[in-house]
Amino acid sequence: MATLVVSACVWRNMAIPWRHCWRWTTGATSTSLLETICCFNGSYATSLLRGTGTVAGSGNEGLSSRTGHTTSLGNSILTRHKSRLLYPTPKPHGCKRIHSDAKLKDPFTLAQKDLNNLYDDIKKELFVSKSELKSLCDYYFDGKGKAFRPMIVVLMARACNSHSNRDGDLLPDQRSIAMISEMIHTASLVHDDVIDGSDKRRGKTTINEVWGERKAILAGDFILSAASMALARIGNNTVVSVLSQVMEDLVRGEFMQLGSKEDEKERFKHYLDKTFKKTASLIANSCKAVSILVNSDPEVHEIAFQYGRNVGIAFQLVDDVLDYTACASQLGKPSATDLKLGLATGPVLFACQQFPELHGMIMRRFSSSGDVARAWQYVQESEGVDQTNYLAQHYCQEAIRQISLLRPSLERDALIRLTQMVLTRDK
């Protein structure tokens, strides 16, 4: 099997700590894709040995200069943990047990008070006199969603408030950002379903199936416009800039998903970049926005951003795994959806190392007769699912390291526990 070697320069800012808990090579002279993702060189080797390296993945490319986000962490907060504001990171507990503190609060329970009436408040933002448009906009705001993003946002807000010597109470504008994050997310789902031609979402028929594609697009646009108005009312130009980046990333990520890379060495980087833009950017920038409202220290903003980025990428990696391991009733949508849409996600990209036949299928987006079934079988026979799960664990370890730099609080510890929930969810 041909060895896949990614040049050090491609991954110089994307190294992650490598623990030899698993061996994914198929021969003594082979270098696996996971190993190339986890490789490091030069000064980054030293930083990783000291526990200050960064996790592989995108995010830096999707941030414009107006957000003020640092693209290189070599001289960032990660190497300045002696600051009086920051707290040392606990040592990892191993690659399978991310955190073992049984007393950590359940994140959803801790955030529930702040999320009460969230969907009712969103519906107020979407108030229109035309009954059909109102029905379209309210369709997914029925309270049956996980509210995963608003939950992270309110917990991050309270953790940053406690860190900043406040009483920890949620500020009204911070709750507004939680609400806006759910509105942007839902609008993106409405548009995604039109692009993908999906007929199921959250266990119910999609808007485009019920009302048609044109009205679905308009409904998504209207939700985004209402979110933009709510954002403008916050009145903080920096926050507006940060959350505007999310909308840019969503569009760029969708365009990236429409294409692929011929070069295998670039394909996984393209996948992680797309994952950041389509999924993690919203979480990362929402976390950053609530930190900006309460603390002027850019180091705190960076911690909030990096936690959201790493959890967001891990969440999507697990989501991509579930497309191969969970049944349709668990997912609330058909399984093998990604393959049917022509998408090569983590499990397939890893499987391609063991089954080079997948390369041609990936390039033609599984469009030939039998491609989907054969690709599915190759993934099942490969270590692609395990490798993708392992990569998600590394992202969660980095998320824990980041959030542990904040002063201890119930909300900070709940965000640590959340990483376990991300890794073990089944839908």
Image: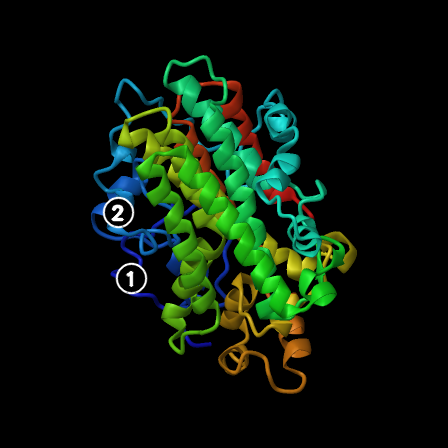
User: Taking 292 as reference, is 358 above or below it?
Assistant: below
Q: Position of residue 406 (x, y in %)?
A: 39, 24
Q: Secondary structure at mark 1?
A: loop
Furthest toward the bottom, the residue is: 369
- What residue is pinned by disc 1? 10
Q: Is 96 in front, or is 70?
A: 70
Label 2 residue SS:
helix
Residue type beneath disc 1: Val
Q: Residues within 10 Å of mark 2 (few under 14, many from 20)?
A: few
Residue at 24% in and 29% down: 80
Residue under pointer 2: 66
Residue sitting at x 51%, y 51%: 224
**Residue 348, percent from left and from top:** 55, 68
Q: Residue at x 50, y 56 (%)?
A: 23
Foreground residue, 107 or 231? 231
Q: Earlier in the sequence, mark 1 or mark 2?
A: 1
Image side of residue 11 versus residue 223, left or right: left
Q: Quadrant of residue 37?
A: bottom left
